[in-house]
Image (cartoon, coloured by chain):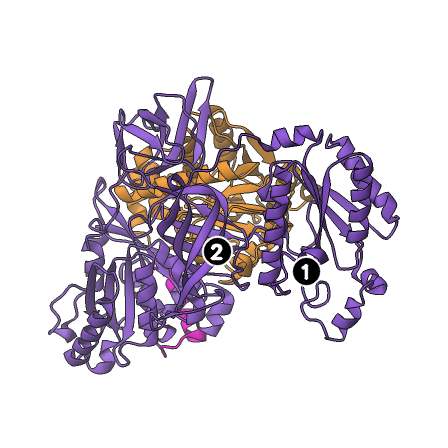
Chain colours: A orange, B purple
Amino acid sequence: MPPRHLKRLESESIEIMRDVVAEFKKPVMLYSIGKDSSVMLHLAVKAFHPAKLPFPLLHVDTTWKFREMIVFRDATARRLALDLVVHVNQDGLARGIGPISSGSSLHTQVMKTDALKQALDLYGFDAAFGGARRDEEKSRAKERIFSFRSAGHAWDPRNQRPELWNLFNTRIHRGETMRVFALSNWTELDIWEYIMWERIPVVPLYFAKPRPVVRRQDALIMVDDDRLPLQPGEVPEMKMIRFRTLGCYPLSGAIESAADTIEDVVEEMRSARLSERQGRLIDNDDSASMEMKKREGYF
Amino acid sequence: MDGGTFLRPIGDETKDLLRFITCGSVDDGKSTLIGRLLHDSRLIAEDQLEALARDSARHGTNGEKLDFALLVDGLQAEREQGITIDVAYRFFTTARRSFMVADTPGHEQYTRNMATGASQAQLAVILVDARKGLTVQTRRHSFICSLLGIRHVVLAVNKIDLVGYRQEPFDRIVAEYQALAATLRFASVVPIPLSARDGDNVTQCSSRTEWYRGPCLLDHLERVDIGAEAESARFRFPVQWVNRSGADFRGYAGTVASGRIAAGDEVVVAASGARSRVQRIVTYDGDLSDAEAGSAITITLDDDIDVGRGDILARPDDLPEVADQFTAHIIWMDQDALVIGRSYVLRIGTQSVTGSVTSIEHKIDVNTGEHVAAPTFGLNEIGFCNMATALPVSFDPYESNRRTGSFILIDRYSNRTMAAGMIAYASRRAADVSWQPLTVGKAQRAGLKHQKPCIIWLTGLSGAGKSTIANLIDQKLFVFGRHTILLDGDNIRHGLSRDLGFSEADRVENIRRVGEVAKLMVDAGLIVICSFISPYQAERDMARSLVGEGEFIEVHVDTPVDECARRDPKGLYAKARSGQIRNFTGIDAPYEAPAAPEIHLATADETPERLADRVIRFLTDRDYL
């Protein structure tokens, strides 16, 4: 049995998920393939057992994810017999938007934020589970569990609803939506410890292995396919690395580590001296940049 | 404290979670204290520390040193103004416990944020500046914590360095606080002298306060026994969701709100009295023999009884209250003030019903605790009132159960959360009232008249043409041989509502009366034509909720305000524009157009005759006639 504090977090998340299914017409779970998504999916399976998941999963594919992520995604969908929807911003693809050619910020805007909004509108989802946590970043510490989005998916910090006790205001008008962060009160360490206790499958990239990397702006970038341009004469180096967060491979910095089991990863986390977002290249510009992205509809 | 202390062995199953709130004014050093706890428990990562050093140089108030407050003040605007205006949640962990801290604003205008943070907290850290002693804020924060059911308090006497680490000011503040606490409902108050800025007595005992023998703050937070909190032992299981998996599985999913349940135990549905036994307690990890408060489970029952979302399962000898009238403390959280009699959505546990505040007993001055008379509650005001719901709800008094005694009020039109409430006691139990059974019912009366009774509700601006159209509908139905009655705004205001004016509250009451009268007439089998400006969606919805499905037909008589003013049949627009009449809808009082009326009549293009025919056609098409 996991320790009491993890059981409490588990129960709280399950309660939130059941509320959403009881109150919304067409919920969806945003599935990013990462560790938080793996935990969220595991909790959802628990929440509705023995029934099958009463909502589909949505993966917004930027076409730049690690290959191992896509393999893991499809294997997970088969293993749990999931209703998985994959959405790509075809318009962005046609315009040739990518993290290398367009820069991380335009790529994220078009292939992630815009793509997500497209998919939500296309399928008419009225509530979307997301795996964001309050401990990730300063502006998220004040995020609600039920985050209200007006028509057009805009987030207005002044228009968020107070959340008292476990009583959530789930009412929305047509066209408005809710993002529901069922893992709000989990920390990164809680996530890893829970993965360890529950033996939840995660993408192997979280565990250390010799992988080909190059150095870009102080970050170790894995050469996952031949789309990553190399300097003349540059040869990728094999290093023992793993990832703390996964996203588009040219934007995900690896850490040098020998932790190749879940127990080692948990141990490494406990003595970690760098925050997990440090490996993400999209929000280094300004400490308030995450808030700007959120207003636009990114998580 | 050495770093190793915070590493814990894998496999510690007893580690638990403590949720607490910090209260104090901006100047009391609240954010600094939380930043210090995070820093000293080694949870500030290196890259965050670098950002902190940068931010401290730019915005800091601590000279060359790190300003820990900047670690926890979140949104951009707040950082720049140097205040915290929302509830921020922070997390840290030690060998013994995981902690979730609600950091909330101290000013009176943020009472609602503080109440939000307090609603989930098991303990409060109340900061007092050692130089200033107790303030009005201390009193307010303590009162709100007590009202929200927090039973354990740490009195953190901060900035002890600024009084020379002396015991005398500390003792004086503690004595004063004990006197205040005697008027509140705390089970324990632990005073600690500390300096958040320098770290004295925060995560380790300070040698500069040798006269202090108690624990440091973190030590106390790790060890305080919160299990002794008067957590109710009475079994309550609010059903969240009915799990139907396959043909033969029907389980009731929910979280045990309090108490304990075991397979084989007898249970009762509180509202209906239906009984059964727990067959299985189903979880993904296998069936359980029993489950305690906080467990998210799925229960199956021996018998096929009617159970749905909103029901509470309890033991036969220990039922919650079931009532449609009760008293409650409420905290008003919206810019728009409470409107007595207006129906709001009341969410309590997993139940949602319409409910209203029927009268106010008193408002509470949060700074002094005094009870004062008040006509309404505005933003951040707290008071005690009488409430009524459209259907009986199941609950416990908040004092004995925080999970089953709390509710929120939601505006039916804007969907904003307007208030949070804590039930005191039931004032009319459902069991005490037995309705006179009617042997001749609505259906019999309507059958005699060969018609389907309903309310045709015309809403629109003054001068839109409501009365003209209503009269035509009435005449046409009369010709068809239907039994009708016409209720018109002006006529009602000369009789039934002649004591009412045109304030928001009076308009609400006017429509409530009309709604009730119309309902009686529908019960009598009549087709009721109502012609009222009825500017608020909430009141039209309230009237709708009084009658059955399909018995309320909302007709929006839609005429642009300029056109109404041009017609001005009673000369009212001219008077309103010149200021002779106040609260005139469309001029200086709002009109909320129906979002989804059954019939929309745009008067600009068609004659009243044709518009009345459209209503008749609607009634014919849908078999009312």
Q: Quadrant of residue A59?
A: top right
Residue B228 left/right relative to B525:
left
Residue B606 left/right relative to A33:
right
| Range shown magenta | B44-63
- Identify the residue at image location x=62%, y=29%: B444
* Residue A253 in sight: no
- Identify the residue at image location x=20%, y=82%: B164
In whole angstroms, how far apart are the C-alphas of marks 1 and 2? 24 Å
Q: Which residue position holds label 1?
A: B494
**Residue type for callout 1:** His
Q: Residue B39's spot in the image, x, y percent?
A: 30, 62
Q: Which residue position holds label 2?
A: B358
On-image quarter of the C terminus of chain B: top right
* Residue B274 in sight: yes
> Chain ID for label 2?
B
Label 1: which secondary element: helix
Label 2: which secondary element: strand
Q: Residue A192's spot in the image, x, y percent?
A: 35, 42
Residue A132 left/right relative to A194:
right
Q: Residue A15's spot in the image, x, y percent?
A: 40, 40
